[in-house]
Amino acid sequence: MPDFISQLSIQYAAAKRAGRAPIIWNLPVCALALIFLIFASPLVSQTAHAQARSMSPAAAAVEEVVVTARRQEESLQDVPITITALSEEQLRQLQVEDLGDIQKTVPNLSLTLGDAANAVIYLRGIGQRDSLAFADPGVGVYLDDVYLGRAQGSFLDVLDPQRIEVLRGPQGTLYGRNTIGGAIKFVSAEPSDELTGRLQATYGNYDRVDVKANISGPIMDSELLGRASFAYLSRDGYSDNAFNGRDDFDKAAFVWRSTLVYRPREDFSLRLSLDGSKNDPDTSRTPARQGGPSPIGTAFGLTLPAGDPFVVNANFNDEERLKVFGAAVVMEYSVSDVLTAKSISSYRTLDYQTHLDLDAHPSDVFGVFVDQDQDQVSQEVQLLYNSDSTKGVVGVYYFREHDTTPDGIFGPGAGLVFASENDQIINSIAIFGDINYQFTLRLGLSLGLRYTREKKDFARKYRSFPITTPFSQVSLGNGPFDFDLAANEIFTAFTPRVGVDFRLQENVMLYGSVGKGFKSGGFNGRSQTAFQLEPFDQEEVITYEGGIKSSWFDKQLQLNAAIFRNDYTDLQLSSFARDPATNTFTDVFTNAGKAITEGIEMDMVATPTAYLLLRANAGYLHTRYKEFIGPGGMDISGQINLINAPKWNVGASIAYTLATGKYGTLSLVGDFSYRTESFTTISNSNSLKQGGYGLLNAVLTFQSTDSHWRFSLGGKNLTNEEYFTHGFDLIAYPGRALAYFGAPQTYSFTASYQF
C-alpha cells in the first residue's frame, strides 16, 4: 500500500512540475492513505491474535458464476462458448457504473459512449460507430433477454444488476439479430423471498450526486414477489465552454426498474418487468478540436487551434434529452421434468433530441440537430429441453421496429442548411435451434441453425434552405422537398454453427466451433442528393474458434483462453467527405469488402488466500482489410486499418482484505488496464489516432460485521490520463478533426445501508 501511494505521488509531482496538475490532483491519494492509517492500524492490532488462530492458507474456491448464454442456467465453466461474466459483487468492486466500465475486464472489447448518446461497441474488431438508425449495431445489447434495437438507450447505467455477460463472437443461432460481433446481456436482480433493501448515496468531484435504492420481497406469501429500484445520477460537465463560461456534457438522469414474479404453482411462473430512464442535462456533449483547420476550414473562419481537451467552444450545445421506456412479460411452463415452454414478449420506446456543435468554434458554421422517435415490439417463443445427455432450445423470434428521425445541419457559415427525415420500419422473423448432445461424460457435440428474414421499408425526405434562414425556421414542414423517396428490401440468411467439446479431466474442457454471423443491409440515411434506391449489402462473418476452460488447485485458480479467426465480408462503414460537385458536406456509407480479424484471449481469476482475489485478462488482436474499394474505385486495403481494434489490451485487478475486526472488514481493490494504439475513425486520421494508454482505479471499502453498512472511497483514472473514446474526421468538410475524450480523474465517497 505505501508503495502504491508513493508511485502516485511521484507521478503527481512530475505532473505538477510540468504545469499539468492542480493541487486537487492528489486528494484521492491523500484520502486513501489517511483512511488506511486511521482504520487499518487499530483493526490490525485488535485482531492480530484472532487472525493468527483463524486464518487458513487455503482460500475459498473462485466464485461460481451461473450464466444463461445458451438460454438455460449453467455454470460459466461448463459452457463451450467464450464468455466473460461479472457478478453483482464483482461489478461493485470494480466500480462499474455504466456499461462502458466493463471494457477493462473483457478481452478485445471496445465499449464507449458515442456522439449522440449511443453505445459504440466493438468486439474482436467487429461493430458499428454510426449513431443514426439506418445503421444497425454490430454487437447486440440485451436487457433481461430483450434485444435493444437502437444504439441510443443501449449505453446502460448499472442499476441493481445480478450479473453482466459478454458473449464474444457471433451468436447467430441463439440470439440472431445484430449479434455478428457478439452479445452483451444485462441481467437484473430477481425479486427475493425475504424482505431486503438497500439505500446508497454518492458524492464526488464535478459535484457528482448519486442516489440509488432498491427494495425486494414477498407481496403475497411466496406466490407473488416484487422488486423495485431507482437511481438519480447527476454531475457537472467535464469540459468548460469558453463561449459562455459554463460547463459542457453534464448529467441529470433518473433510472428505474420494477419486477413482479407470480408463481401460483411449481410448474408455472409469470414475470412482468417495467423499466425507464430519462436524462435531461443542460448541455449536449461537444468534441474538442484535435486537428486542423484545413484550408477549407480556414476559409470558413475556423481559425482556433487545437487546445485543452476539456475546453470547448460551443454555441449549439443547448439540447440533450433521452427518454426510454420498456415493458416485458416472460412466462415459463414446465411441460415435464425435461421440457419447458417459455415466452418473452416486450415493448419499448425511445425519444431522443440533441444539438451537436461540430465546428469547434463560437460561430454558426456546422451544427447538427436530431429528433428521434423509436418504438419496437418483439415476441420470442422457446421450447427448452434438458436431460442428462441433451440440452437445447428451439424457437421462433419476431421483431418489429419503427424509427422516425428528423435531423439536419445548420451551417450558414459553411453555406449549408438543410432538414431531412428518415422513416424506417423493420420486420424481422427468425426460426432457430441449438442442441448440445453428450456422447460420453467427456465428449459433447453442439449443432445450431437460424434462418432470418428481415424486411426494411425506408423513406427519406430532404429539404434545403437558403443560408440566411434562421435556425428557428429550419424544419421540414410540408415542403417543398428537394426529394421525397421510398424503397424497401428483403434480407435473408442461414447462420449455422457446429461445435465440439471434450473434457480432459473433470475441471478442464477443450472446445472448438465454426459459426456464421449476419447483419442485414439497408439504405443510406444521410443522402443529400436524389436518393439512391440501391441498398447497401448485408454483412456476414464466418468465425473459427477454439478454447480451453479450466480450474486448478481445488478451484482456487480459474484459467480460460481462446483463439479465433473471423472472415468478414461487406463491412458497413460510415465516413464523411466533401462533395466535389457541390463543395459541401457529404456522407460516405459503403460496404468495404473483406477483412480478417484474428487473435487470442485469456481470462484468469485466482484466490491464493482467503484474503486475496486476483483477476487478469488479456487480448491480442490482429486485423486487416483484404479488400476496401475507396474513392475512384481503388483498392486501399493496404493503406488503412480497422477501427477500435488495438493490437493488445490487458487488464488486472487485486482485491485485498487489509484487516478484519469486531467492527467490520477493510478492503482495498485496485485495477489497471492498458490498450495499445488504435484508430477511432474509418479514415485513419492521424489526428484521431489514439496512442497506447493505461487507466488506474482504486477503491477502499469498509463493511460492517453485520453487512448492513458499507463505506467506500474510490478514484478512477487516478493518473489523469487524456485519451480519445470517439472522433469525427471532418477535415475534408468543414475542415476540422474533432475528438471526444474519456472522463478525467474522478473520485467519490459512497455510503450504503442494506437490510
Image (cartoon, helix red, strand yellow):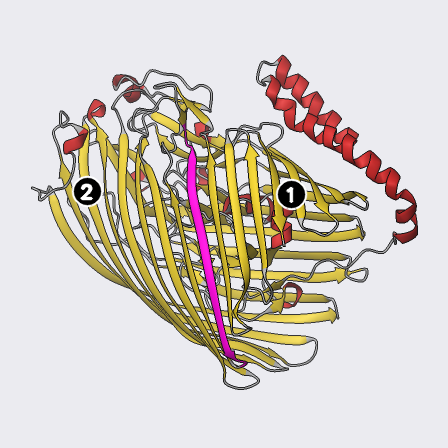
Residue 56 image offset from top left, x and y in percent: 88, 54
Q: Quadrant of residue 85?
A: bottom right
> In front here: 92 or 19?
92
Left or right side of 688 for 669: right
Residue 118 image offset from top left, x and y in percent: 39, 44
Q: Quadrant of residue 140?
A: bottom left
| Label 1 Cα neighbours within 10 Å, binned few <14 / some 14-19 / many ≥20 | many
Q: Magenta stretch mostly in which secondary structure?
A: strand
| Label 2 Cα neighbours within 10 Å, binned few <14 / some 14-19 / many ≥20 | many
- Tag 1 secondary structure: strand
Query: Magenta includes 264?
Result: yes
- Tag 2 secondary structure: strand
Left or right side of 658 for 209: left
Q: Is residue 393 visible?
A: yes
Asked if 381 appears above or below 276 in the picture, the reply is below
Query: Magenta includes 653?
Result: no
What amino acid is found at the position of numbered circle 1 in the picture? Gly
> In front here: 300 or 670?
670
Q: Which span is picked out in magenta?
A: 248-266
Left or right side of 354 for 636: right
Q: Residue at x 66, y 41 (%)?
A: 711
- Check residue 420 in the rendering and tell me which mark sits there, or answer none: 2
Residue 152 image offset from top left, x and y in percent: 37, 47
Q: Is residue 626 visible?
A: no
Asked if 581 appears above or below 635 in the picture, the reply is above
Mark 1 highlights which residue? 651
Between discs 2 and 1, the one toward the N terminus = 2
Q: Residue at x 27, y 40 (%)?
A: 370
Residue found farthest to the front: 220
